[in-house]
Amino acid sequence: MKFLDEAKVYIRSGDGGAGSISFRREKYIEFGGPDGGDGGRGGDVWVEAVDGLNTLIDFRYQQHFKGATGGHGMGRNRTGANGDSVTLKVPVGTQVFEEDQETLICDLTRIGDRYRLAAGGNGGFGNAHFKSSTNQAPRWANPGLEGEEKTVWLRLKLIADAGLVGLPNAGKSTFLATVTRARPKIANYPFTTLHPNLGVASIDGREFILADIPGLIEGAHEGIGIGDRFLGHVERTRVLLHLVSAQEEDVAKAYRTVRNELEAYDVDLGEKHEIVSLSQVDILDEATLKDKKAALEKASGGPVHAISAVAQIGMTDVLRELASVIRAEEARLGISAPEPGEDKGRHDKWEP
C-alpha cells in the first residue's frame, strides 16, 4: 500500500426530482382534481472518518463523487424517492479544505466523525401542492433544485502521540523499528525514509503511537530536499523526540538546523515539548561522548539523553520520559488515558 497524504476531489450532490403535473380521471368519480406528487430530494455528499485506513491512496484512482438525482413525482400524489447519498471514507486525522487550500471546512479527528460537504437539491412541488379554492386545476409544477458542486482538497495529518524529528540518517527509523513492530526501510544513505511511518511503542504496560517523518535539512521550508511537507504529521503530537546523530561533527549546528526548520514551518510546532537525544552513541569513546553531549546540552538548553537503538543504550529512559510527557499532556487536556493492558484499538504496525 502506497502512502498518499493529499488528494484533490470533485464532488456534486444530486439534483432534486421534478414535481408532477397530473389529474385524477377515473370513471364514475365525479370530482377528480390535481394529484401530482412532489419530487424526491437529491443525494448528499458526506465525508466520514473510519477505522482501518492510514492513507488517501484510494482517491488517486477515483476523484469524482456524485450524489444520485431524486426521483420525479408521479400521479396519485406519489412522491419521488430520495436520491442515494455518497460518502467519502477517509482516515482519522483528515482535514478537508476548499479549493483555495486555505479555508478549512472540517477536521475529522475521531472515528465516526461525519460532515456533509454538499447538500442535495430539494425536490420540486407537484401541481397538487398549488391547488386552492381559487385555483382548483393548476397546470404547473416546480422542477427540482440543482445540487451543489465544488472541488475540495483532502489533507491527512497522522494521529500520533509522539513524533521523531532530526536530520537524515539521525537514526529515527532504527529507533522506530527497535521500540515498535513497524518495519521502516533502514539504510546507510540520506533520505531512506520517503514517507511517514507509524508504530506503537510500549513501556511499563502503557502504549503510545510514535510517528517517524523524513529527515529535515537546512532550507527544508523553502523546498530543499524533501522539504517540510511531512511536518504536518507531527503537528498533532504531544511531544517531539529530537534525535541528533553522534556522527555529526558539530552536534549543536545539527540541532539548530532542525529547530530553525520547525520554527519556520509553524511557531506552535517549534514551541511543542521536546526531548533531545544524542543517538548512535555506541560509535563514540567516553571522552568524545562527554564533549558532544555537553555541546548538545548547551545548544538545546536542557538535559540530553545518550542512546543507541542498535546497542540498546538508554532506550528505556527515553521511552519512559516520552510516556510521562504524553500522560501529563493528556491530563492537562482532560483526556483519560487507557489503563495498562486495556485495548486501545490501535494498529501495531504501519505498512505504506
Image (cartoon, rainbow, N blue to C red):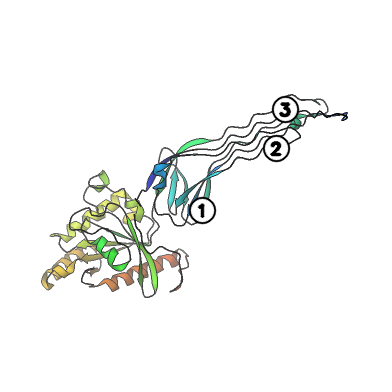
Place of residue 151 in the rendered image (x, y in percent of width and height, measured from the top left): 45, 37
Q: Residue at x 21, y 61 (%)?
A: 244
In the image, taking residue 115 as reference, residue 300 lies left or right, namely: left
Q: CA distance from mark 3 to mark 2?
A: 12 Å
Residue sitting at x 36%, y 62%: 349
Neighbours of disc 3 within 10 Å: few (<14), some (14-19), many (20+): many
Report the side of 191 relative to 13 (left or right).
left
Q: What's the residue type where badge 3 is placed?
A: Ile
Where is 233 relative to 274, above or below? above
Quadrant of the rendered image containing residue 177: bottom left
Give the residue at mark 2. 79
User: At 69% across and 32% down in the image, what residue appears?
Assistant: 125
Image vertical order of residue 64 relative to residue 351, above or below: above
Helix, strand or loop at mark 2: loop
The residue labelled by disc 3 is 21
Residue 15 percent location from the top left of the image = 58, 34
Disc 1 residue crowd, few under 14, some 14–19, many 20+, Cα 10 Å: some
- Looking at the image, which is closer to me, 122 or 328? 122
Q: Residues within 10 Å of mark 2 (few under 14, many from 20)?
A: many
Q: Which label's residue is closer to the chain start, 1 or 2?
A: 2
Which residue is at the front of the view, 145 or 275?
145
In the image, 265 versus 214, the foreground residue is 214
Q: Do we see residue 286 in this rendering?
A: yes
Q: In the image, which disc is placed on residue 113?
A: 1
**The residue under label 2 is which amino acid type?**
Thr
- Sooner in the amino-acid sequence: mark 3 or mark 2: 3
- Residue contact between numbered discs 3 and 2, judged by CB atoms under 8 Å: no
Q: Nearer the viewer, residue 189 or 167?
A: 189
Which of the labelled discs sits on residue 157, or is there none?
none
Tag 1–tag 3 contact (CB < 8 Å): no
Q: Is residue 271 visible?
A: no
